[in-house]
Image: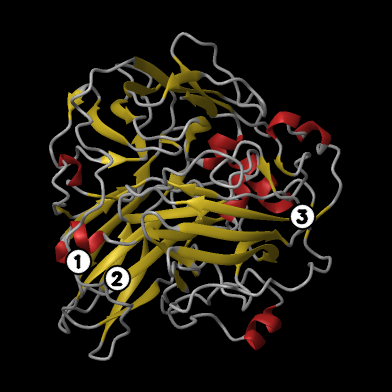
Amino acid sequence: MRSMSRFLASNNLGLVIGGTLLSTVMACKTPESSTAKNTPTTASRAASGSPCWRYPDASTVLEPVALYSKGGVLKVDLAYQASTGPEGVRYCYTLADGSLSPTLHINPGDHLIINLSNQTQAAVSKDDMQMQIPASQVCGAAIMKSGAVNLHFHGTNVAPTCHQDEVIYTSINPGESFTYDITIPNDEPPGLYWYHPHIHGTAEAAVLGGASGALIVDGLQDVQPSVAHLPARTLIVRDQLLPDTSEPSDSLPAWDLSLNYVQVPYPHYPPALISMQPNQLELWRVLNASANTMLNLKLLYDGVEQSLRIVGLDGVPTGSQDAQRQGIVITKTNILLAPASRAEFIVRAPDKSVVNPVLWTLRYDTGPNGDHDVERPLARITTSATGQQPAKMPAAKTSTAADRFKNIELPKRTTSRKLYFSQKEAETLEGDANFYITVDGQIPTLFRMGQEPSITLKTGSVEEWLVENRAPETHVFHIHQIHFLLVEQNGVRVSGDERQFLDTVTLPYWKGTGPYPSVKLLVDFRHVVPGDFVYHCHILNHEDQGMMAVIRVTP
């Protein structure tokens, strides 16, 4: 699986790094509210020669710059840039001062306006004409060139139309600019979402390179009052290429990891540092912004598992789907996060007697054809009475927002569908596998630009989907624009705590005999804006190699 990944990340189909980048980043017109800047000085960035800079190993984890809407509008000027590091090509979204990947805070009903300029440079490629966009579907550039970029606002129920959350045909080529003007729905659940590039064929390389950031719909404290006044920490895990190009072994991971751009490299894994005050409760908002890596998080204090009190998953407050507008707390000792998944949970800092408090990701078995996701530390917690605290959550108030998911189990199912993941292995060591997501009864087909929808339906419906994994490798189901309710796993009705609204769900690999691993989902099309959007495996190597399809929702 890794050969194509390494080619894309190191070459990006003709991206030129050595040339002079375009003019300086546009001045940022963000609102007055923001956290203090947590980036290296301008001088140190200039000395590094890298717009996509990284913190040194074992640095203290700092909050991304936070930008807040004001008067119902958040306006941001972002530049998409590229540079090189020891692991290969890096990609990033930057503000005018060089800050990376700001956290965008919005409220339901807000307008999010992003002026995005692609400040990379790309060589003319013989493949450019092969990526020409149908004239009727052009959004941005008519020919998608090497180095093109766009933005996907993952998890939001934003319209799949040009200048909003349309990713199939939207293309911003090097040297070009594009404006996103997005209306956040009034019933968008409060929680953690994110943004990242979604150009088919290079999505993996861009996300591996670090181009991603958090998007937070504020108001969680109104649905879950237990988080009111807590310091809220945003933690973004990203994966990247290993400088060592050896194939995975028992100890070698498929990918290195970083935490808020503090790298945790193989083989010694120097953990990032999280500074807290002893015994302080905090809300941790954790995003797995990896292209391919599964995370299985555990917090250990001197080897003792700590309780993780989950209050939100994939942007939806846990337990809030009962139309009471009140969340519940789910207590676990480990949290599985597939690429693109998010969890918001309350933790308590260690007291001064704890010697070794560490945030770990455990080994995850992705199957005989999958990646090697090894156990390793991500961060070590340090405590002091003056420990660094992120900004605190506001006080809770009575929620008056509409409940998007109200009564999802009451309507009669308009349709039941079966979909499945499958793959065809490469015939040579240098080749790449083909990956498919198929509606049962149709012919497995690799995704291609301009292809017809595999599913067509009308807005207003609730459908029951059974999704199977028929491959010897873990796959991760994600659908754009909407959430689904998880109701069964492997034919067994899930418990109340697991019965949550998600936009991403993991299907373990098939062992070659017995039933296929499966999930049953109630997919909520009642409030989606009509248009074409996609569903795919969110292991982006698989998506880039064909494991994606189009769904069309009509009025």
State the quadrant of the N terminus: top right
Question: Going 54% across and 16% down the picture, which residue do you hit?
Answer: 444
Question: Going 15% across and 82% down the picture, which residue do you hit?
Answer: 353
Q: Residues within 10 Å of mark 1 (few under 14, many from 20)?
A: many
Question: Going 38% across and 45% down the picture, which residue do you hit?
Answer: 338
Question: Circles 3 and 2: CB distance less than 8 Å?
Answer: no
Q: Position of residue 335 (x, y in %)?
A: 26, 51
Mark before the other along the chain sequence, 2 or 1: 1
Note whether residue 192 is visible. Answer: yes
What residue did someone put label 2 on? 232
Measure how far apart labels 3 and 2 are at the Cα level.
Answer: 36 Å
Question: Circles 2 and 1: CB distance less than 8 Å?
Answer: yes
Q: Is residue 56 above or below residue 547?
A: below
The number of discs equals 3
Q: Is residue 535 above or below residue 155?
A: above
What residue did someone put label 3 on? 174
